[in-house]
């Protein structure tokens, strides 16, 4: 509450203060409990085992649910026998909860997690939709039995997609629920966006009536020829998986596919998606490959399912380019999903210009399906191709189509920054971070700040992102942080940041190309060694596991840096060696797609060195013109503008 003295927290809910060791902190605070029998919707103390810390040593978790352990089953029977308040007296170090909103695992005494909170919100959602909670018990023992064993009442009159959201939130098994509160929020936001989308345009009633009469015979014939196939085992789960994949909930999508395959192990699309979605554990992937091969003989020739299965199997054997050829050559009638997978496989093949054309064609169709993936990947392709105006248009569409989604807002922030709208980009990136703080949103805000010239805070955020990043993301976060440290004169710190990519914990990561590139910029005397590592990354690439980024191009830039350095437009060039025209080939090589997106200033690095090479050869006007043409695509590319002024 806001008071004349400032903001006051009036109710900490079920927050619990933890000591530095993760155990309960010493406190004299005790919840006030009336001297009558406890109500089923009133916070009660726990008699479970002491709290077990999870991931942080000092935390508070406050929600409508019991973010704490609940009584064991034995305790519940004791409660049933005696509802006296003495049975629930708080003891030092114990936790509390609200019985009506407790998840089944809390009743059994297990430590709760986010899935327990999802259950509690599911109870609240049921209460909002029906006016009463899903449980009608009048005693604690009966309540605990209902929560653990009885299905919640039907939600009569509620649309099926909303019922499905509540049903999943109230699943008895934690693993069957939404894995996080963010996932639940996303499901609600997606349904809201779908439900309140503008209605489709309809023909005027009079015209429709005429057409109906005139085309009745044709309509009956067409319906018989094109009537949808009956829904088979697993079909609904497979459809749900595709919807989840569209909004980048890969873990949820894979979970839905596992459920579908448990019902129908040879389901063609379920097995194809398990392969094509990416990110599946090796065991799931191997099972899907076997399932796809079993499904192939029974899958109708020239059908959509056959095209997807052919593409998936080819993807595992020959990689993305061959998979795209298999998909488009299967002879299946063209539809939106197949066109999407063709674009996606072009994207994974590194054919970004081709993928961009295909994504553009898909967006020309107003159909809502798969727009999340299209918006995200198309905007990144446009940034790579340095079309910031169109990228911003797509970023805005992404944000508007998925309100409240951190990914959508984060992409929008990136496109704002690329278009030179720095102040708006920072606001949007801050919003994405508030919606879902994670290594990606931390790095997203850092990148926006770096491009706006706010490097101190950008470095702090990159450091926080690096601390949270997994093995595949650490190298690119190291590259971004070290580049900014070097720009600020912190050479030793920058070297330490990228050192694990050379011979430390990240030296085996396929994704370390950008990190090696920055290491080569920092230490040109090690160019031969670093370029050799990049060459190895390129040599190890296969069609099934293509090179991450463009290591050959990066190796060329590192070697060029050893003999010529123009400052990359981010540092003054200083004394320059004689220009070698052969270096121009290194600067004209394809960019590393991932470094161009994730590392600030990388996208213009080769351009800047090419301009410096021209200037060193005496063509200063040509150098300035080269930079000015790119700087004009978006305002606030100050590093290009200042470099061009030097050449003028």
Image (cartoon, grey):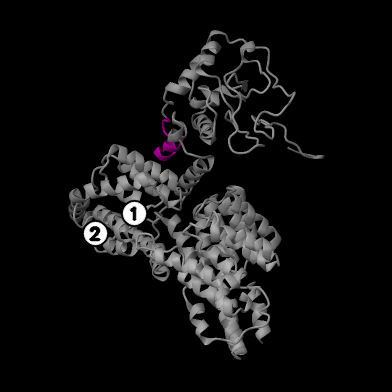
Residue 315 horizontal/vertical position (percent)? 32, 58
Residue 114: name its quadrant: top right
Q: Nearer the viewer, residue 346 or 503?
A: 503
Residue 160 colored in magenta in the image = yes
Question: Please, what secondary structure does the residue beneath circle 1 have?
Answer: helix
Question: Please, what secondary structure does the residue beneath circle 2 have?
Answer: loop
| Numbered disc total | 2
Residue 486 horizontal/vertical position (percent)? 66, 66
Residue 233: name its quadrant: top left
Q: Which mark is residue 205?
A: 1
444 is higher (above) or lower (below) than 64: below
Q: CA distance from mark 2 to mark 1?
A: 35 Å
Residue 60 colored in magenta in the image = no
311 is higher (above) or lower (below) than 519: above
Stretch in magenta: 155-166
Q: Residue at x 59, y 56 (%)?
A: 443
Which residue matches tag 2? 332
Q: Nearer the viewer, residue 526 or 163?
A: 526
Label 1 crowd bin: few (<14), some (14–19), many (20+), radius 10 Å = few
Tags 2 and 1 in contact by the CB under 8 Å rule? no
Q: Nearer the viewer, residue 279 or 403?
A: 279
Q: Residue furthest right?
A: 5
Q: Quadrant of the C terminus?
A: bottom right
Q: Residue at x 26, y 52 (%)?
A: 305
- Earlier along the polypeptide chain: callout 2 or callout 1? 1
Label 2 crowd bin: few (<14), some (14–19), many (20+), radius 10 Å = some
Q: Is residue 625 visible?
A: no
Q: Quadrant of the N terminus?
A: top right
């Amino acid at each position: 509450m806001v008071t004349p003295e400032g903001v006051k927290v009036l109710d900490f809910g079920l927050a619990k203060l933890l000591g530095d060791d993760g155990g309960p902190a010493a406190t004299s605070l005790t919840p006030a409990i009336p001297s009558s029998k406890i109500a089923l919707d009133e916070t009660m103390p726990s008699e479970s085992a002491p709290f077990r810390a999870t991931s942080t040593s000092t935390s508070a978790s406050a929600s409508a649910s019991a973010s704490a352990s609940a009584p064991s089953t034995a305790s519940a029977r004791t409660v049933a026998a005696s509802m006296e308040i003495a049975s629930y007296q708080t003891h030092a170090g114990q936790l509390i909860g609200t019985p009506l909103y407790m998840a089944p695992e809390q009743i059994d005494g297990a430590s709760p997690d986010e899935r327990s909170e999802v259950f509690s919100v599911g109870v609240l959602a049921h209460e909002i939709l029906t006016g009463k909670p899903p449980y009608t018990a009048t005693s604690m023992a009966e309540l605990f039995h209902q929560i653990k064993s009885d299905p919640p009442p039907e939600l009569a009159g509620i649309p099926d997609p909303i019922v499905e959201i509540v049903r999943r939130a109230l699943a008895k098994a934690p693993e069957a629920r939404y894995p996080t509160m963010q996932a639940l929020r996303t499901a609600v936001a997606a349904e809201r966006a779908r439900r309140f989308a503008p209605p489709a345009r309809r023909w005027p009633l009079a015209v429709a009536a005429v057409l109906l009469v005139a085309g009745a015979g044709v309509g009956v014939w067409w319906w018989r020829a094109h009537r949808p196939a009956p829904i088979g085992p697993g079909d609904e789960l497979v459809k749900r998986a595709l919807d989840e994949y569209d909004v980048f909930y890969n873990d949820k999508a894979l979970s839905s596919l596992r459920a579908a395959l448990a019902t129908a192990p040879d389901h063609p699309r379920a097995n194809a998606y398990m392969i094509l979605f990416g990110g599946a554990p090796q065991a799931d992937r191997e099972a899907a490959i076997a399932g796809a091969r079993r499904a192939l003989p029974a899958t109708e020739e020239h059908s959509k399912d056959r095209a997807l299965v052919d593409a998936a199997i080819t993807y595992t054997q020959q990689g993305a380019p061959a998979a795209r050829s298999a998909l488009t050559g299967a002879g299946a009638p063209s539809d939106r999903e197949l066109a999407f997978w063709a674009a996606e496989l072009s994207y994974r093949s590194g054919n970004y210009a081709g993928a961009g054309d295909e994504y553009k064609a898909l967006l020309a169709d107003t159909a809502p399906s798969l727009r999340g993936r299209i918006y995200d990947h198309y905007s990144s392709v446009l940034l790579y191709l340095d079309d910031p105006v169109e990228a911003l248009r797509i970023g805005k569409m992404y944000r508007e189509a998925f309100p409240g989604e951190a990914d959508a807002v984060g992409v929008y922030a990136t496109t704002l920054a690329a278009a030179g709208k720095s102040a708006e980009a920072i606001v949007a990136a801050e919003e994405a971070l508030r919606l879902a703080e994670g290594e990606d949103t931390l790095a997203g805000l850092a990148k926006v700040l770096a491009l706006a010239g706010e490097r101190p805070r950008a470095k702090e955020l990159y450091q926080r992102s690096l601390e949270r990043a997994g093995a595949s993301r650490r190298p690119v976060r190291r590259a971004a942080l070290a580049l900014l440290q070097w720009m600020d004169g912190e050479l030793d710190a920058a070297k330490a940041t990228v050192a694990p990519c050379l011979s430390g914990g990240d030296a085996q990561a396929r994704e370390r190309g950008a990190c090696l590139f920055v290491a080569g910029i920092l230490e040109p005397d090690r160019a031969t060694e670093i370029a050799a590592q990049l060459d190895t990354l390129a040599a190890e690439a296969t069609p099934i596991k293509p090179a991450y980024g463009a290591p050959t191009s990066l190796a060329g830039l590192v070697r060029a840096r050893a003999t010529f350095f123009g400052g990359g437009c981010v540092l003054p060039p200083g004394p320059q060696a004689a220009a070698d025209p052969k270096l121009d080939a290194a600067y004209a090589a394809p960019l590393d797609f991932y470094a161009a997106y994730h590392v600030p200033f990388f996208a213009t690095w080769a351009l800047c060195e090419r301009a410096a090479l021209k200037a060193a050869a005496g063509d200063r006007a040509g150098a300035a013109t080269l930079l000015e043409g790119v700087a004009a695509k978006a305002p606030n590319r100050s590093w290009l503008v200042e470099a061009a002024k030097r050449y003028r």
